[in-house]
Image (cartoon, rainbow, N blue to C red):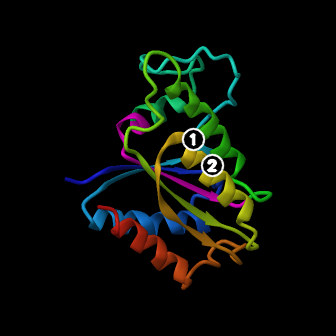
C-alpha cells in the first residue's frame, strides 16, 4: 500500500526551481503508488511561533493560533513522509519553511507526541544560486536526529538562481528517482 507524503514547499515562487524539484519528486512518488500532498507555504497565512507552550496534540488544531497551519496539521498527522523543499536563504531553509517547522512543535505538546518518532521519514529538496549547503545539511541532520525520523536523502541543486535555470539538470532526475525509490 502506498505511503502518504506531505511536501512543505517554502519557496515564494510557485513555478520556480524548488517547484521543479518537487514536481519531479512527486511524479516519481506517485508512479511508485504513493499519495502526495504539497503545501505552498508562501500562499498560506502562517504566523510565527509564540513560544507559549499552549499547544496540545490532542486537539483538532494543536496550536492556539488559528491560521494556515490548520490545513497542514491534519495532513502531517496522517503522513508517513515529510519532504522539506526550499530555496537556500542565507545557508538555511527559507523563512516560510522555518516558520512552519517551528509551528509543527505543537504536535509534540500535550498528551501524545505526534511528531517525534512514529516511524516517519523525510527528504530535503533545495535549489540555490550557490552551492553552500553544508550548514543546512547540518541543521537537517540534527532535526532528523531530534525527531527520530529516517532521512531518505536530499537533492541539492546549486547554480540555479533564475526561474527555469534547473531545466535539463541532473538534480531533476535525482528528485524523480528519490520519489520513485520510496517503498
Counting from the top left corner in percent of width and height, residue 166 is at 60, 77
Give the residues drawn in magenta, as a range: 75-88
Residue 82, compared with residue 105, is above or below; it is below
Measured Cα–Cα span from mark 1 to mark 2: 6 Å
Tell me the quadrant of the picture where the C terminus can be found.
Answer: bottom left
Residue farthest left in this picture = 1
Residue 172: image tag: none
Counting from the top left corner in percent of width and height, residue 76 is at 43, 38
Residue 15 appears anywhere in the view: no
Choose between 168 and 147: the one closer to the eye: 147
User: Badge 2 is on which residue?
Assistant: 142
* Residue at 66% in and 71% down: 163
Choose between 106 and 10: the one closer to the eye: 106
- Left or right, 135 with respect to 106, comes to right
In the figure, residue 31 lies in which quadrant? Answer: bottom left
Q: Secondary structure at mark 2?
A: helix
Residue 65 appears anywhere in the view: yes
Disc 2 crowd, CA 10 A, few/some/many (<14, 14-19, 20+) = few
* Residue at 60% in and 20% down: 65
Residue 146: image tag: 1
Q: Secondary structure at mark 1?
A: helix
Counting from the top left corner in percent of width and height, residue 96 is at 66, 45
Disc 1 + disc 2, Cβ < 8 Å: yes
- 139 is within the stretch colored magenta: no
- 84 is within the stretch colored magenta: yes
Counting from the top left corner in percent of width and height, residue 10 is at 61, 51
- Left or right, 49 with respect to 4, comes to right
* Residue at 40% in and 63% down: 26
Choose between 145 and 180: the one closer to the eye: 145
Amino acid at each position: 500500500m502506498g505511503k502518504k507524503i506531505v511536501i512543505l514547499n517554502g519557496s515564494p515562487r510557485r513555478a520556480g526551481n524548488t517547484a521543479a524539484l518537487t514536481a519531479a519528486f512527486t511524479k516519481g512518488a506517485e508512479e511508485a503508488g504513493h499519495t502526495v500532498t504539497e503545501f505552498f507555504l508562501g500562499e498560506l497565512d502562517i504566523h510565527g511561533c509564540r513560544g507559549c507552550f499552549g499547544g496540545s496534540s490532542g486537539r483538532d488544531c494543536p496550536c492556539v493560533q488559528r491560521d494556515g497551519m490548520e490545513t497542514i496539521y491534519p495532513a502531517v498527522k496522517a503522513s508517513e513522509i515529510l519532504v522539506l523543499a526550499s530555496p537556500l536563504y542565507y545557508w538555511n531553509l527559507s523563512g516560510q519553511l522555518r516558520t512552519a517547522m517551528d509551528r509543527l512543535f505543537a504536535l509534540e505538546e500535550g498528551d501524545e507526541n505526534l511528531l517525534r518518532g512514529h516511524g516517519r521519514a523525510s527528504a530535503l529538496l533545495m535549489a540555490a544560486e550557490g552551492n553552500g549547503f553544508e550548514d543546512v545539511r547540518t541543521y537537517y541532520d540534527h532535526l532528523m536526529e531530534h525527531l527520530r525520523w529516517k532521512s531518505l536523502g536530499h537533492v541539492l541543486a546549486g547554480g540555479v538562481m533564475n526561474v527555469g535555470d534547473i531545466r535539463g539538470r541532473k538534480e531533476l532526475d535525482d528528485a524523480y528517482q528519490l520519489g520513485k525509490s520510496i517503498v
